[in-house]
Image: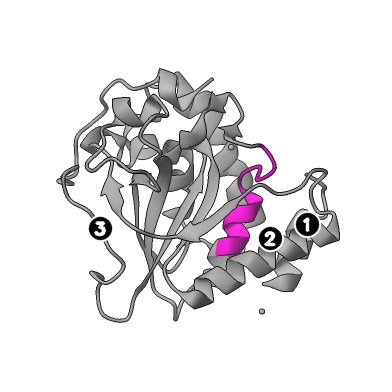
């Protein structure tokens, strides 16, 4: 990625393997993996975005720090099997991608700004891979919830490609949202709950979070 990428993103806007660390962490949530989430079931005045950009342990740790983001839930989308488990998704046979369901307040943060963070915090040019995490479950994708999200994601992708912000073509999938299945409880807030005792958190996630905080310091919760 070229150094000028963050500046280009700001102009058009008006992070070893997760699969190898599937041991249970602290269970502090009550999310049921048999529950699907839909953009129509959201608090009044909020909107939903669904992004896939690698291991959800990393992406959740990033997006939940943004001012205006109400919740960032790790889960699975884009596949055929109902109620998939983490082990099933890791086989690459369910068609799902690890992703985040982000509920946000559009009066504080826009979809454009969320897209800016999305493009900046992963490599959208590697097909079905992010770093050491490889497989269709790690593909780059925007699961759009309406025509406006689709148009904005497609515009960003086209303009980034045209600008030469990346050395290779962007392979991000832009596809309609269908269903979202929250991941098992131990995946939720994984970095927050396991930073002190998990090498993956210290070696892989922490550097990504630190870089994100420097680049997007003006967009963080206070």
**Which class describes the residues within 10 Å of circle 3: few (<14), some (14-19), or many (20+)?**
some
Residue 31, given in percent of the width and then of the height, sits at: 18, 46
- Residue named by callout 2: 157
Does the magenta segment cover residue 104?
Answer: no
Do the residues bearing badges 2 and 1 touch, measured as CB atoms within 8 Å?
A: yes
Left or right: 188 with respect to 168? left
User: What range of the chain is rendered magenta?
Assistant: 115-126
One can see residue 59 in this view: yes
Left or right: 10 with respect to 86? right
- Residue named by callout 3: 37
Q: Secondary structure at mark 2?
A: helix
Instruction: Establish if 54 lies above or below 3.
Output: above
Instruction: Establish if 90 lies above or below 97.
Output: above
The disc at residue 161 is: 1
Distance in Å between CA atoms under marks 3 and 1:
32 Å
Q: Residue at x 63, y 66 (%)?
A: 154
- Quadrant containing the C terminus in the rendered view: bottom left
Residue 156, given in percent of the width and then of the height, sits at: 68, 65
Towards the viewer: 48 or 63? 48
- Residue 177: name its quadrant: bottom left
């Amino acid at each position: 990625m070229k150094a000028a990428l963050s500046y280009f993103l700001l102009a058009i806007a008006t992070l070893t393997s997760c699969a190898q660390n599937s041991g249970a962490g602290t269970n502090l949530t009550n999310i049921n993996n048999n529950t699907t989430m839909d953009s129509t079931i959201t608090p009044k005045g909020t909107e939903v975005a669904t992004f896939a950009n690698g291991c959800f342990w990393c992406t959740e740790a990033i997006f939940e720090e943004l001012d205006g983001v109400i919740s960032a839930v790790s889960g699975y989308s884009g596949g055929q099997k109902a109620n998939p488990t983490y082990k099933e998704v890791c086989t690459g046979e369910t068609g799902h991608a690890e992703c985040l369901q982000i509920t946000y307040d559009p009066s504080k943060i826009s979809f454009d700004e969320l897209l800016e963070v999305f493009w900046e915090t992963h490599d959208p040019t590697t097909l079905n891979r992010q770093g050491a995490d490889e497989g269709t479950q790690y593909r780059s994708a925007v699961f759009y919830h309406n025509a406006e999200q689709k148009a904005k994601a497609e515009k960003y992708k086209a303009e980034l490609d045209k600008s030469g912000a990346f050395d290779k073509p962007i392979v991000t999938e832009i596809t309609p949202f269908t269903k979202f299945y929250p991941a098992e409880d131990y995946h939720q807030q994984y970095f927050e709950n396991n930073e002190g005792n998990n090498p993956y958190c210290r070696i892989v996630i922490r550097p990504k979070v630190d870089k994100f905080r420097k680049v997007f310091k003006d967009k963080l919760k206070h």
